[in-house]
Amino acid sequence: MKKRFIAAILTAALALGTLTACGGSDEGTTAPAQEDASEAESGEEAAPAEEDAAAQEGEAPADDAKEPAGEEAVESKGTITIAASATPHAEILEQAAPLLAAQGWTLEVTVFNDYVQPNMVVESGEFDANYFQHIPYLDSFNEEQGTHLVNAGGIHYEPFGIYPGTKSDLTTLEKGDVVAVPNDTTNEARALLLLQDNGIITLKDGVGLEATVRDIVDNPNEIEIQELEAAQVPRVKDEVAFVVLNGNYAMEAGFSVAKDAVAYEQADSEAAKTYVNVIAVKEGNESNEAVKALVDALKSDEITEYINNTYDGGVIPFK
């Protein structure tokens, strides 16, 4: 009995020490636990007092009692290893970890700063999954690299938005006004489709996500489309009527999709469905228990609420 009680005190002391290490320096938190551990090691008789209290309450002595109260142990199902970009992917995964832990899964997230290695480590089997890319990039990567990666579930999209420059109302556009858009193939098409969805231009039928400025067939306001490298677009916002930006560049420029965008891609738009960020796995693993648990956790109400409350419209859950 006495040995068991001492062990419990030592365990509590170690746990408090660990929490303090994770949470930063706080000398006032660790001291009491250290004092209790010293008393236990020196043979302080705390156990009999516990037995007396139990006897007064009509309970059995601690020797006959169950293990100390606490969270019920969950049977371990294993570890899920996932490669991710830092923002917002790793942040979202951090929120999903406790949900998976409650089911017996340990989520191990590794942050990568490039778009090649996260796919290669999944292809090799070193990691179970990754979370950083949309489907067009995944398909292109497979074609170019000969990999065998598949979409296991769409989690979120980062909407393109039209943001104010020198003007804040699309109805005030007039001849000679300039709208800045990204010049790379994928992002330019999304920007042009968004302008079309809001009645600013009309594109050739069927061009979809391959649209360029050469596909504009109607431009009633005779606006000028200024094509810039994506990172440069937010820098000209004080020089043009409007800028069209994807989510991460908008946030870096200090824009809030929810508060500042005069228009943005809707969940049922062609772009949102196409550019949803997915959990990618090696072909054949998309239906295994661990991957399904991961996708379900990321599509849960708890994660939906976290995304909606955290990213101010810059990241939108995909259902």
Image: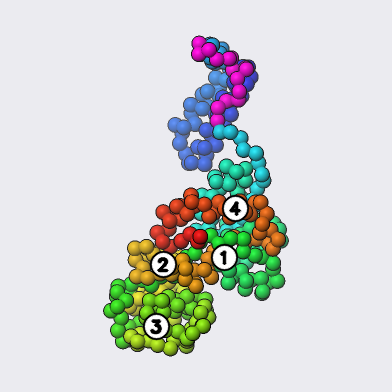
Magenta segment includes 30: no
Mark 1 element type? strand
Circle 4/circle 1 CB separation < 8 Å: no
29 sits to left or right of 173 = right
Q: Which of the two labelled residues, at mark 4 and mark 1, occupies the earlier sequence position?
A: 1
Which numbered mark, 4 or 2, is in the foreground of this view? 4
Residue at position x 52%, y 41% in the image: 22
Looking at the rendered structure, the kind of residue marked 2 is Ala
Q: Position of residue 175 (x, y in %)?
A: 31, 87
Amino acid under label 1?
Gln
Residue picked out by circle 3: 201
- Above or below residue 317? Residue 272 is below
- Mark 3 → mark 2, Cα distance in angstroms: 22 Å
Location of mark 4 (residue): 294
Pair 3/1: label in front: 3
* Residue ID for mark 2: 250
* Residue drawn 41% across the image and 67% down it: 250
For the N terminus, give its image quadrant.
top right
The residue that appears at 48% across and 41% down in the rendered structure is 24
Label 4 or label 1, whichever lies nearer to me, is: 4
Which residue is identified by label 1? 133
Residue 231 horizontal/vertical position (percent): 45, 72
User: Whole-Å distance between the Cαs marked 4 and 2?
Assistant: 29 Å
Q: CA distance from mark 2 to mark 1?
A: 18 Å
Front residue (pair 224, 100): 100
Q: CA distance from mark 4 to mark 3?
A: 41 Å
Magenta region: 56-70
